[in-house]
Image (cartoon, rainbow, N blue to C red):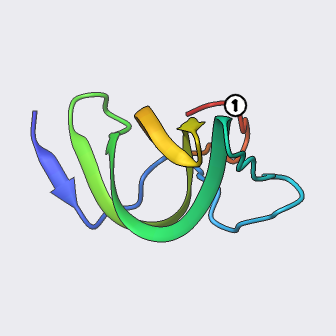
Amino acid sequence: MGSVYGQSISRKLVVADDTIEFSRVIPKNGFMRTYLSTNTEIWDLAADKKDWVRASQNVLICIEGEYKNGKREGLFTSYVIDSAQHVSR
């Protein structure tokens, strides 16, 4: 398998932040979710299903984890959001 840089990826990802669609949850204790608009490098499987495509792209990143006494507690996860199915990570 090879990789190709600079081609567009096949997935359509959420780029713009919409605070109504993507509501923040920032408690002092419990589950936290927030979003960050940024430009990042994305890797995706090419249409031939053999090669990887690498591209720089604007995306909306979701960050989730737990807070305890106003501080991060444990493992936090981050992922980009599919524009067709927002539950897809």
Q: Is residue 8 left or right of residue 3?
A: right
Q: Position of residue 37 (x, y in %)?
A: 57, 68
Between 84 and 71, the one nearer to me in the picture: 71
Q: Residue at x 73, y 41 (%)?
A: 84
Q: Is residue 29 above or below residue 23?
A: above
Amino acid type indicated by mark 1: Val
Q: Does the image show residue 11?
A: no
Q: Residue at x 75, y 53 (%)?
A: 24
Which image quarter: residue 17? bottom right
Between 4 and 16, the one nearer to me in the picture: 16
Between 77 and 6, the one nearer to me in the picture: 77
Q: Is residue 34 above or below residue 46?
A: below
Between 17 and 70, the one nearer to me in the picture: 70
Mark 1 nearby-residue class (10 Å; few <14, some 14–19, many ≥20): few
Q: Looking at the figure, which quarter contains the N terminus?
A: top left
Q: Is residue 11 left or right of residue 15?
A: left
Q: Point out the residue furthest to the front here.
A: 69
Q: Residue at x 70, y 31 (%)?
A: 87
Residue receiving disc 1? 87
Q: Position of residue 78 (x, y in %)?
A: 47, 43
Q: Does the image show residue 59?
A: yes
Q: Is residue 56 above or below residue 49?
A: below
Q: Looking at the figure, which quarter contains the C terminus?
A: top right
